[in-house]
Image (spheres, rainbow, N blue to C red):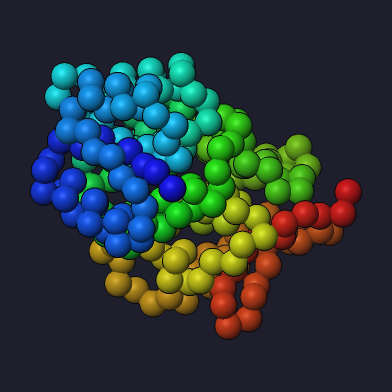
């Protein structure tokens, strides 16, 4: 696996490089947008980690250029900003995932692994599990064509589970991804939210999509009978 990291903060770069190399990933590093774009153009990477605030050429422009060249390489955006509108713009421009600084390296590695496991994907913003549709841009959820109203946390939980149907997520993984790092509550918050989610997404329908794996965690069914 060969990755490209485009990041101008030297210290952060070194830390990310160390974390990724410890996982035996090959890594190229660019410290400005122009160099990042030139490398992305020259090589076929398995994954690109891209900062937004970059000298010479902005991360947004690098993202745009990469997507014009390749629809397939997964791109993980790093940014200090956390504006939802901007996030939406970058998803529309072809980003696959988004990590707001400061982040835990465990989370970076988890997202990197998830993107690599998923591999090249179509650019559709809609996740589908059975007759459930989760639109990651508009954050609208429908089941059997019927709109389902969710709170932001319920949505985040559902989106996370729906990204990898068939996979089981532990309560700790769910908390790390859906709640922020400052969350210090009990992991049974996950059980509470799964219950809320089920009451809206599963209870009104004959086929259940959210599954509990006792002693492990939660996931969504991989496929449903048509
Ligand atoms: Ca930067």
In the image, 101 versus 156, the foreground residue is 101
Whether residue 148 is visible, yes or no, is yes
User: Would residue 207 be found to the left or right of residue 133 on screen?
Assistant: right
At a point 76% along the width and 61% down the height, the residue shown is: 208
In this orientation, which residue lies closer to the viewer: 210 or 11? 11
Q: Is residue 177 left or right of residue 16?
A: right
Task: From the viewer's side, name the closer residue of 200 and 85.
Answer: 85
- Answer above or below: position of 183 versus 5: below
How many numbered callouts? 0
Which residue in the rendered view is the most extreme toward the right?
A: 226
Q: Position of residue 186 (x, y in %)?
A: 39, 77
As displayed, is residue 80 above or below residue 222?
above
Q: Nearer the viewer, residue 37 or 194?
A: 37
Give the residue furthest to the bottom.
215
Please tell me which residue is depicted at 76% across the width and 37% down the height of the picture.
145
Please state the horizontal and vertical placement of residue 191, each as a whole percent of the image: 53, 72
Q: Is residue 179 visible?
A: no
Horizontal and vertical percent for residue 183? 31, 66
Can you say whether 142 is above or below 186 in the image?
A: above
- Please identify the quarter of the rendering in which residue 123 is found: top right
Q: Position of residue 77 (x, y in %)?
A: 34, 38
Q: Residue at x 27, y 27 (%)?
A: 36
Query: Which residue: 53% across, 31% down?
Result: 72
């Amino acid at each position: 696996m060969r990755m490209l990291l485009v990041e101008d903060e030297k210290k952060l770069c070194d830390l990310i490089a160390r974390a990724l190399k410890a996982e035996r990933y090959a890594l190229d590093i660019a410290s400005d947008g122009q160099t990042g774009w030139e490398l992305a153009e020259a090589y076929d990477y398995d994954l690109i980690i891209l900062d937004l605030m970059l000298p010479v050429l902005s991360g947004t422009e690098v993202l745009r250029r990469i997507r014009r060249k390749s629809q397939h390489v997964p791109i993980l955006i790093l940014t200090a900003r956390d504006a939802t509108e901007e996030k939406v713009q970058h998803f529309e421009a072809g980003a696959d995932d988004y990590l707001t600084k400061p982040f835990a390296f465990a989370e970076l590695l988890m997202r990197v692994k998830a993107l690599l496991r998923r591999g090249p994907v179509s650019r559709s913003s809609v996740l589908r599990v059975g007759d459930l549709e989760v639109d990651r841009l508009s954050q609208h959820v429908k089941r059997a064509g019927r709109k389902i109203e969710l709170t932001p946390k319920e949505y985040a939980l559902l989106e996370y589970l729906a990204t990898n149907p068939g996979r089981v997520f532990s309560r700790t993984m769910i908390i790390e991804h859906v709640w922020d790092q400052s969350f210090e509550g009990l992991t049974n918050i996950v059980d509470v939210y799964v219950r809320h989610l089920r009451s809206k997404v599963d209870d009104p329908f004959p086929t259940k999509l959210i599954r509990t794996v006792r002693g492990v965690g939660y996931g969504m069914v991989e496929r449903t009978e048509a």
